[in-house]
């Protein structure tokens, strides 16, 4: 009896607030590549054939994904964003790819991507036009869903531009149904809450039932200030959005911009660590044909990817902010915990952060194993409730840890002792 009660309690604890969209997809956060942040709406293939939005770009990215270990690391979807279609629908009212930039058409591109063991994503909009002014799907949901299914597309990113906000919910739900009716498994990536937030608090129960992931906030840019704004927005709305995440449906803080121009290596590590903590889709927007080995190593870091893809499927959250250190944690399977300590002080050098146990404030009770993953991998060994763990964190960098309890009863307690952190900092510096 006690056992049954315990199991029931565990189920309530683990299950997210609502049922996920029941299409069997995105059981862990989606991994792949999406063109927007890096390549935007570059349609000038005469002047810039290597970087314009064309079938060549996706084929080359797919080639790189296989050749350079991305696929093996778990990155699976190669995704088209805005600016792929022709400005006119065809005679039967169907969307068609720009004939000059996609001479083979999307179906042929999908065949190519599938031949590499990868999946193809496409982009459309719930309203009259896409954000860049291409034809939207309003009034054509069934036709467009069927067209994407006929082309063997595997993911749809559905934007929310040019739409009356009061009709957003209806539009996103209808497209979800239309996709379902095609009978093809098409992962459904929404921007519904992003467009609703300016007017009202979105209904995350409905969103989770409708979409496999959903954008809540502004587009990511290739800059540290953009990453910080996304983190701050997420932390300040976590009570509303974190409970909605779980297997089958995820909050989407937008693309990984690692490997581009705007982030220092420490900042790239921070984005990777925090996106894993947030159980975010890992959709890179970079140039896989030209990426530095350090960024590549970071994006393919198995220990971080394991946190992102953890089977417990719970999104992490911000816990404390002390002396310009921000601590985030994510519960993992087998009672483990991932902890990220972000140094938000952007002046000076590395600073020490101490996680310390004092009577009544136990880091690990009775014992745990601590592994540091970032800034470099280090086994910090077995810790007891008497231990203190000292981390050195660069400005705008992140220390990432996993904590594994060692206990006969597989329970753990973890507390952050902020006053000791403040005190200890001086002695460590
Ligand atoms: C919006 C979306 C972006 C991208 C562009 C394309 O801004 O939020 O992610 O898809 O549209 O125009």
Image (tube, rainbow, N blue to C red):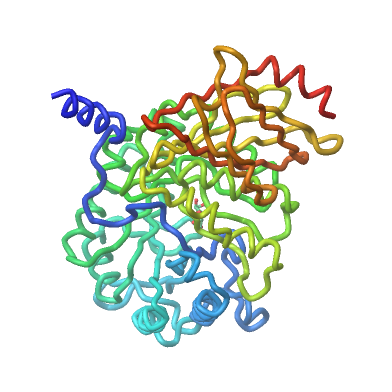
Q: Which of 302 and 285 is in front in this view?
A: 302
Residue 84 in sight from this viewpoint: yes
Q: Position of residue 377 (x, y in %)?
A: 65, 51
Q: Which of 120 and 282 is in front in this view?
A: 282
Q: Residue visible at 41% across and 52% down?
A: 29
Q: Position of residue 122 (x, y in %)?
A: 40, 66
Q: Residue visible at 19% across and 28% down?
A: 3
Q: Where is residue 424 in the image (x, y as percent from the top left)?
A: 76, 21
Residue furthest out toward the top = 360
Q: Residue visible at 30% across and 42% down?
A: 208
Q: In which quarter of the image is residue 290?
A: bottom right
Quadrant, the N terminus = top left
Residue 104 lies, with reference to residue 11, above or below; the image says below
Residue 135 lies, with reference to residue 177, above or below; the image says below
Residue furthest out toward the bottom = 104
Q: Residue visible at 67% across and 41% down?
A: 398
Q: Which of 290 and 71 is in front in this view?
A: 71
Q: In this view, does 264 lie to the left or right of 24?
A: right
């Amino acid at each position: 009896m006690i056992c049954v009660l315990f199991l029931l309690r565990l189920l309530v604890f683990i299950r997210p607030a609502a049922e996920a969209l029941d299409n069997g997809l995105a059981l862990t956060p989606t991994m792949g590549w999406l063109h927007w942040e890096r390549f935007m709406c570059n349609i000038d293939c005469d002047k810039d054939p290597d970087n314009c939005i064309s079938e060549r770009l996706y084929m080359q990215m797919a080639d790189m994904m296989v050749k350079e270990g991305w696929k093996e690391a778990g990155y699976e979807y190669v995704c088209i964003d805005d600016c792929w279609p022709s400005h006119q629908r065809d005679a039967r009212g169907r969307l068609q790819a720009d004939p000059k930039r996609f001479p083979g058409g999307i179906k042929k591109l999908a065949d190519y991507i599938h031949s590499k063991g990868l999946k193809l994503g496409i982009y459309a909009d719930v309203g009259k036009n896409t954000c860049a002014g291409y034809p939207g799907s309003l009034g054509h949901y069934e036709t467009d869903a069927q067209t994407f299914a006929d082309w063997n597309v595997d993911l749809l990113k559905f934007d929310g531009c040019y739409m009356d906000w009061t009709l957003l919910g209806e539009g996103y739900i209808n497209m979800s149904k239309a996709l379902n009716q095609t009978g093809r498994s098409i992962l459904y990536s929404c921007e519904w809450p992003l467009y609703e937030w300016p007017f009202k608090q979105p209904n995350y129960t409905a969103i989770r039932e409708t979409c496999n992931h959903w954008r809540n906030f502004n587009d990511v840019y290739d800059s540290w200030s953009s990453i910080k704004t996304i983190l701050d927005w997420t932390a300040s709305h976590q009570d509303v959005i974190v409970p909605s995440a779980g297997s089958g449906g995820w909050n989407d803080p937008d693309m990984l911009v690692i490997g581009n121009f705007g982030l220092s290596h420490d900042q790239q590590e921070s984005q990777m660590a925090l996106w894993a903590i947030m159980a975010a889709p890992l959709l890179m927007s970079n140039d896989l044909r030209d990426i530095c080995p350090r960024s590549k190593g970071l994006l393919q870091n198995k220990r971080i990817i394991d946190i992102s893809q953890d089977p417990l499927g719970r999104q992490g959250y911000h816990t404390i902010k002390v002396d310009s250190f921000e601590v985030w944690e994510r519960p993992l399977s087998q009672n483990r915990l991932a902890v990220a300590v972000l140094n938000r002080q952007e002046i000076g050098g590395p600073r020490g952060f101490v996680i310390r146990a004092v009577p009544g404030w136990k880091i690990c009770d009775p014992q745990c194993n601590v592994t540091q993953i970032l800034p470099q991998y280090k086994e910090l060994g077995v810790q007891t409730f008497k231990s203190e763990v000292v981390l050195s964190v660069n400005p705008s960098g992140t220390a990432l840890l996993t904590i594994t309890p060692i206990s006969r009863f597989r329970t753990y307690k973890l507390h952050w002792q902020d006053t000791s952190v403040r005190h200890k900092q001086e002695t460590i510096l």
